[in-house]
Structures are given as C-alpha cells and as structure tokens.
Amino acid sequence: MEKNYFLAKWLNGEISEDELKNSLNEEEIHSYKKIIDATKQLKTPNYNIEEGLEKIKSKHTNIKVKKINFTKYVYRVAAMLAIIISSYYFISNKNTTYVTNLAEKTSFELPDNSNVDLNADSEITFKSKNWEKDRILNLKGEAFFKVTKGSKFTVNTNLGKVQVLGTQFNVIVRDTYFEVQCYEGLVSVSYNNKTVKVPARNSFKILNSKTELITELHEINPSWIDNNSSFKSIPYKYVIKEVERQFKIKINYDSSLEELLFTGNFTHENLEVALQAVCVPLNLKFTIFSDNQVSLQ
Amino acid sequence: MDNKNNNSFCDEKRFSTFFRENSKSLSNYIFYKCGNLDLANDIVQDAFLKFWSNCSKVIPGKGKSFLYRIATNLFLNEYSKSTVVLNFKSTLNDTVTNESPEFLLEEKEFGVKLQRAISNLTEVQRVTFLMHRIDGKKYREIAEILNISIKTVEKRIHYALISLRKEIENI
C-alpha cells in the first residue's frame, strides 16, 4: 500500500491546500502553516566562503609537499632497514673468533653456557647463530672445554676432530703435536680416517703424525689454567715453545735437544723460575738478554 | 594529472567553483547534525581537502554525493553521542514591527518552542527538513546528496512536521 506523505507533498507544492482539507481540519492546517513560515525565516550562522577556500588551497599545497617529503622519507627508511637487515644477516652469519696472543690466556662462554679456557697464542672460531643445534668450532693452539650436555659438540683442528656430548676435555694442537686430554665424560677423536674413543682420566697424543699413545691422566684439570704447564714425555721443542708462548720471549738452544722427551712442569708466573725448571733436568744454564732473548747452554 | 583535464575536479579552477557552490550547504548540513559551528567548519575543511586529494577518483556527476559521503564519515568519526543544542540565528523578530507587546512576546515564545522542537527531531528528520526549509533544496537534490529515495525524503519531512506540531502545541 503506497503511503501518501501528504504534508511533504503539500510543502512541495504537489498538492493544494484544498486537497489537504481531506486529511486535516482548519486548526491543524493553520498550525502547520505557522511552522512552515517560521522555519523559512531561520538562518544558519555565517560561513565565510572565500576564507574557507583560501585555507583549503594552502593546506592542499602543504599536503602535496608533505606527501613528496613523506615518500622520500619512506624510501630513506626502507633503505636504512635494508642495510640493517642485511647487516644483521651478514653479522649473524659471521663467525665469532677468540684469539689469544703470546703470554695471554682467556676464558669465555659459548652461547650454550659451555666454558672455554684458551691458552696463549691460540684461536677459536665458531658461528654463534644456531649454536644450540650445531655446536662446531675451530681450534688452533690449546683450549680446555667444559661442555654442557646437549647436541654433539665438535672441535675441528687441522690435525684431527674431537667430538663430545657433554664433558670436560683439553685439546692441544701445536704444529704436529696433537693431544686430547679427557677429564670427564667421553671424547671421540677422529684423525686420518681413524676414530678413537678417549674415556675420562685419559689422554690421547699424536706426535709427528706417527706415535699414538693413550696414557692415564692424574690431574683433574689441565695445569695451564692455574698458570703452570706440565708435560709428560713430551719432546723438548714443544716444552720450549710453550715457555716462549707464555713469556713472549725467544729461546735459542742446541737443536739436538729438540726430540728429547721431557717430563716436568714450569710456572707462568716467573720467567727465571720457569727457565730453571726446564733447564735443570737437562743440565742447561740460561742467559737472559735485554731484547727478550734467552739462550740455553 | 592536475592540469590535464579541465573538467576534472583536480583542476584548481574547477575545484574552486565546486567549493563555492557547495561549501555553505555542506557547512549547514553538519550544523544541522550537531549544532556546533566549529565542528562544522573543521569538517568542511577536511572533507574538501580529502575530496581534492581523491579528485581523480570522482565520477563525473557524482561529485556532490561523494563530498557529502566524505563529510558524513568524518562526522561519524569525530562526533560520538552528544546532546544537540541548536542555535539558529533567527530573523523571526525582524518581520514584526508595529504589533502589541503581547503579540511580540507570543512570537518570541513560539520561536523558542520551535527551536527546541527542531532539536528534538531525529537527526535524519532534522537534517532533511532543514535542508529543505533553510537551504531551499528540492526533494530531488536532497535525495541525491543523502543517497536516499525521494519517497524517503517525503516521509522524513512529513513526520518532521507532525513531530514539530505535536511538541509545540503540547499534544
């Protein structure tokens, strides 16, 4: 049923006042007329058109300028982000390296809280990203490891590879001298396509890439951590090299002594005491020169 | 894009004409909704700015309804529920000069009642009704701007008149 909005139609001029009389009485018509006339008189507050237009024109130009600057700004931010993100990938994929110089020792923790003591003139390199899953590092020199239980822990050296799951062990890689001392747990050593398992309180040694020995360990820790180097049947040249390393000096001695096996130890805390320790067993005397040179006779 | 097409709203001349033609009505439109002149002015500014920014998207012939749609949305965002207080500048008093004081007072009272009654209309009734009475817009134009049918315009005006009379005469 189509509704007839007769008041609206009348207001619009679509129906006459006479037709209206069909729906409304005189009084009602009079009331509506009064309302209609009164509302015609109403005015809204003034609006300044030209002022409004000027404001808009200037704002519009500003917005255009802002948009251009904004675009430049966005590009700059994007460029910065690109650099930051790529550096992050670059850095996070980079290796972490710890290096010790002569007469220097250091101790640090790996991302999994495994502890590493690094002896003088040594270097360890590893990738810290994804460490928990892939515990692999490269060693040059000597380091003592206390490895937390977890995924396989691997020490790569150029003489062989050492693998553990969680244990304490010391690895020495100097020239052709390779030794792995296991203080706790079980260590697997791979070299020349061979693998040997080294249980706790045992040490595995390769000298000149031929001699292979497993001997017993009596210490609970490698002594160098306590500033003392100890050797059991180690060729003299390695002993002297270690003295040089710990004191940053150069030692001259007769080369015929190089392969003599030495058992003993020396302190890192006093050069003269140390030299005594390595000279006396071989009946040698030492002379210290001013330019960090020592000669043994 | 700005100066290529002279019929496009992006062209400054064309936009300025459009502004002059519609700014007062638009301001009134918002004013009918809330009775707040400052808000009306702000929304007119923002609506035209937004319109100009989107000038390339405007369909020819649909400029006005697009403009009012922008303004309505801006209004909805700005203005949650509030009491409406209208303050029309009325010229009622000016038209009567040599009548008796009682008559003048009566007219003044009527004016006050009328204003209050207008405030108490529903928003859609008030807006539609005043667009016709104050802006002088025809039903067809009102329908186009508000995006409703002419029938709806008639309905709103019809019931607005009924409500006004009811309130003024205390029925």
Image: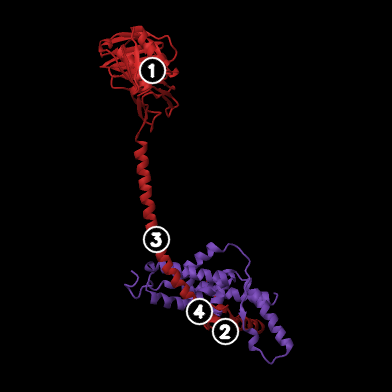
In the displayed structure, does residue B19 sit left or right of residue A27?
left
Residue that mark 4 sits on: B137
Q: Mark 2, chain letter?
A: A
Residue marked by disc 1: A170
Chain A's shade in the image?
red
Q: Nearer the viewer, mark 4 or mark 2?
A: 4
Q: Are marks 1 and 2 in contact (CB under 8 Å)?
A: no
Helix, strand or loop status at disc 3:
helix
Between disc 1 and disc 2, the foreground one is 1
Tint applied to chain B in the drawing: purple
Q: Nearer the viewer, mark 1 or mark 4?
A: 1
Please name the amino acid that badge 4 sits on.
Answer: Lys
Question: Which residue occupies 63% across, 88% down?
Answer: B95
Is residue B147 visible in the rendered structure shown here?
no
Distance CA(mark 3)–CA(mark 1) = 61 Å
- Evaluate whether label 3 is on the same chain as label 4: no
Q: Are marks 3 and 1 in contact (CB under 8 Å)?
A: no
- Which structural element holds mark 2? helix
- Chain of the residue where label 4 is placed in the rendered structure: B
Q: Position of residue A220 (x, y in %)?
A: 45, 13
Sequence-first disc among 3 and 2 = 2
Q: Are marks 1 and 4 in contact (CB under 8 Å)?
A: no
Q: Secondary structure at mark 4?
A: loop
Q: Mark 3 = which residue?
A: A69
Q: Of residues A159 and A240, which is closer to you in this image?
A: A240
Of residues B39 and A215, the one nearer the viewer is A215
Residue B5 place in picture, x, y as percent: 32, 73
Instruction: Let me know if marks 4 and 2 both belong to one chain.
Output: no
Q: Which one is earlier in the sequence, the residue at label 3 or at label 1? A: 3
Q: Which residue is mark 2?
A: A19
Specify the quadrant of the image occupied by residue A130. top left
Going 62% across and 69% down the picture, which residue do you hit?
B84
